[in-house]
Image (spheres, rainbow, N blue to C red):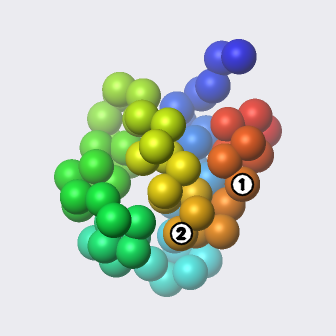
Amino acid sequence: MNVDLNEIRSRILVAMAEKGMSRRELSERAGLGESAVRDLLTRTENPGIVTLARICDELDLSLVAVLTK
């Protein structure tokens, strides 16, 4: 499965906007360092599955849907 990181970012950013959630708030709620959220949204490296799962949980997103749409 080849997942487009830009699509993942887009889905996360849309969900953050819909919930009015900042990077800082998301990182705190997901139990992650703020840098983990920033890196996911700005870097070209793929995020770890645990990081992505925590973010999806806080945004009420399905991890499977984020990775496969």
- The crowding category of the residue bearing disc 2, from other C-alpha atoms within 10 Å (few below 14, some 14 to 19, many at least 20), is some
Q: Pointer 1: what residue?
A: 62
Q: Position of residue 59 (x, y in %)?
A: 58, 68
In the image shown, does 68 or 18 lie closer to the viewer?
68
Query: Element type at marker 1?
Result: loop
Kind of residue sitting beneath label 2: Glu
In the image shown, does 62 or 19 lie closer to the viewer?
62
Residue 44 visible in the picture: yes
Q: Residue at x 59, y 27 (%)?
A: 4
Label 1 and label 2: CA atoms lie apart by: 10 Å
Which mark, by number, is residue 52?
none
- The crowding category of the residue bearing disc 1, from other C-alpha atoms within 10 Å (few below 14, some 14 to 19, many at least 20), is few
Is residue 14 depicted above or below 52 in this figure? below
Which mark, by number, is residue 58?
2
Q: Residue at x 39, y 74 (%)?
A: 29
The quadrant of the rendering that contains the N terminus is: top right
Query: Element type at marker 2?
Result: helix
Residue 67 picture quarter: top right
Q: Residue at x 49, y 83 (%)?
A: 20
Is residue 36 depicted above or below 18 in this figure? above
Kind of residue sitting beneath label 1: Ser
Q: Position of residue 46 (x, y in %)?
A: 42, 28
Residue 15 visible in the picture: no
In the image shown, does 30 or 20 lie closer to the viewer?
30
Q: On the picture, is 49 further left or further right than 57?
A: left
